[in-house]
Image (cartoon, coloured by chain):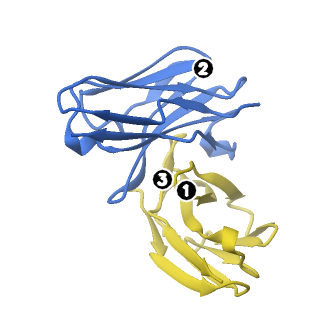
Chain colours: A yellow, B blue
Amino acid sequence: KNQVEQSPQSLIILEGKNCTLQCNYTVSPFSNLRWYKQDTGRGPVSLTIMTFSENTKSNGRYTATLDADTKQSSLHITASQLSDSASYICVVSGGGADGLTFGKGTHLIIQP
Amino acid sequence: DAGVIQSPRHEVTEMGQEVTLRCKPISGHDYLFWYRQTMMRGLELLIYFNNNVPIDDSGMPEDRFSAKMPNASFSTLKIQPSEPRDSAVYFCASSLGGARVSYEQYFGPGTRLTVT
């Protein structure tokens, strides 16, 4: 069964600090991995999409890494801002379909 | 572009009633996806369409759920009869192509459904 596991479930850090969120997956065959940001009461918004051949991708202060051999990904947030407070969801495409398998997300709170 | 539009934004109904959720995808997008989000299960794919044709409905929980896409600019998700366990946020998303080839999916604001 296709699965995506994220850790930690929740995280609180001070504004200006860095943090790293983790994602492990068992989706096969693998097509691509995405990180989404979801603000409270809003739909998810894409941060990065990575294919098998990409191991690092950045979007401003967000940097995602992918290790397709170990089936792990991470999302690093640099110099956090209050607006980074949100849920971050790891999503994997694969399994022979055009749908996506979602992790349950990491709830990140940035404190001033 | 207005993005993906969903209506209503909030729906409260009694158990046993029929509920219809609506979605207007981004113009020109060939794929449309319906998702459900709950605290316990997170986001789950219910069904998706390509060029108005349902491709995979294996995520639809049971026969009480049905989805249609009569044309490229409109889709509905219907629950009949509704049950309290259907309470969730339902998202519609659209994209230019399939997820397997890394096309971006754009999500609507969601419909929060409460069944009492």
Up-down: is B37 above or below A64? Answer: above
Question: Callout 2: helix, strand or loop?
Answer: loop
Up-down: is B59 above or below B41? Answer: above
Quadrant occupied by the C terminus of chain B? top left
CB atoms of marks 1 and 3 within 8 Å: yes
> Could you tell me which residue is drawn at 20 percent across and 36 percent down?
B83
Mark 2 chain: B
Q: Do tags 1 and 2 sit on the same chain?
A: no
Q: Label 1 belongs to which residue?
A: A92
Q: How many other residues sit within 10 Å of disc 1, few (<14), some (14-19) or many (≥20)?
A: many
Quadrant occupied by the N terminus of chain B? top right
Q: Who is closer to the viewer here, B113 or A2?
A: B113
Mark 1 chain: A
Q: How many other residues sit within 10 Å of disc 2, few (<14), some (14-19) or many (≥20)?
A: few
Q: How many other residues sit within 10 Å of disc 3, few (<14), some (14-19) or many (≥20)?
A: many
Q: Label 2 belongs to which residue?
A: B51
Q: Label 3 belongs to which residue?
A: A101
Distance in Å between CA atoms under marks 1 and 3: 5 Å
Q: Amino acid at mark 1?
A: Val
Q: Is residue A64 visible?
A: yes
- Residue A39 lies in quadrant: bottom right
Q: Amino acid at mark 2?
A: Asn
Q: Residue furthest top?
A: B70
